[in-house]
Amino acid sequence: MVINSEEHSRISALVLEDNPGDYVLVEDYLIEKFKGIEINHCTDCKSAVEYLQNEEHKTSIILLDLNLPDMIGLELIQKILSFSYHTPIIILTGYSDLPLAKKSLQLGVYDFLVKDEVNPTLLHKSIEFAINRRSYVKQIEDEKLNYENTFSLSPQPMWVYESDTLKFLDVNDSAIQHYGYSRDEFLNLSIDQIRSPSEIETLKDVLEKSRNNEKRVYYGKFLHRKKSGVKIIVDIYSNYIRFGDLNARLVLANDITERENHLKSIQKQNKILREIAWTQSHTLRAPLARMMGLVEYIMLKGSADEEFQEMIQHINTSAQELDEIVQNIVNKSNSIKI
């Protein structure tokens, strides 16, 4: 990103300088290179802190002299940094001090310039670099915060493990609560230690495939063990990430034990229904068929008694209805998938 003229007008600089001549020179440089820049001036650390503590003041860049009347050197740098963490700082000093420059850069200062070497172009480039760098740093910090929030606040267990050693690198609170291990205990374990012994070979096969194509997303269903020894069934979603300097995988675990047990219960019930249907089909229909045969035989033999004939007819009709009901039950039971 390069600062354009429109962004120039939004730049606000805070100059901490007690030497009037040096301040005027810096002010001229800023006005020459930045159109519409707002310049604020403090001559000591105390007034600068008061300025930075005012939330109404929006500062884009801080230009800091290392020798102020009430504070100097590293102490001054640390003081200003503590009140301006998100604002880039450029040091303007009257002397070259390489050890101090290195230390200040380690603390978080963006640039270290010697006043006698500064000119409008050099100062402009330093400020432009500092503001652009701060923009990138903020973007990275925001992305890191989003990751941390997604990871830490997830209601489902999540963890990160190193691809080579399989050691846990990080776990969220949900994983700690769900599996029963403390954070320190988790970080002393490897992922094979929460697996069922019967699935270690499956785990090795999955890991080998992951190494061959480490950046692929992986889904799977596995048997895990809690600290208490209780076994749970989990759906695993795993993806490759870089964790610092390490190759790692980010894992999201969804405990589906209750769902699986419920499905097994339904399957068991369906099996029982199928068995009932078979019984009805073979056991109940056999005597029913014999009864219908006897009714038909009686009807063929005949009888002059009309009332008797009517009763036999009712029995035959009822037997046929019962046979139809049984057949419907059998058909519906057979349609159930186990």
Image (cartoon, rainbow, N blue to C red):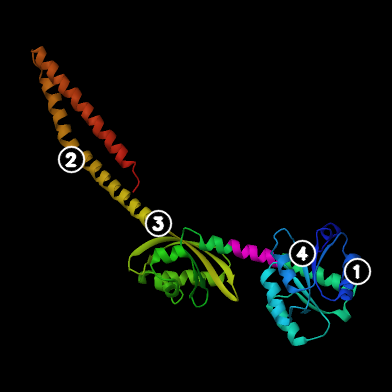
| Callout 3 crowding tier (Cα within 10 Å): few <14, some 14–19, many ≥20 | some
- Which quarter of the picture shows residue 52? bottom right
Please name the residue that numbered disc 3 is placed on. 256
Helix, strand, or loop for circle 1? helix
Please name the residue that numbered disc 1 is placed on. 28
For image coordinates 50% across by 59% down, the residue present is 154
- Label 3, label 1: how far apart the Cα atoms are: 68 Å
Please name the residue that numbered disc 2 is placed on. 283
- Label 1, label 4: how far apart the Cα atoms are: 18 Å
- Pointers 1 and 4 in contact (C-beta within 8 Å): no
- Label 2, label 1: how far apart the Cα atoms are: 106 Å
Name the residue type under label 4: Ser
Name the residue type under label 1: Asp
Helix, strand, or loop for circle 3? loop
- Tell me where residue 301 appears, x and y as whole percent: 10, 20
Q: Nearer the viewer, mark 1 or mark 4?
A: 1
- Tell me where residue 68 appears, x and y as whole percent: 77, 78
Pointer 1 or 4: first along the chain: 1
For image coordinates 30% across by 40% down, the residue present is 333
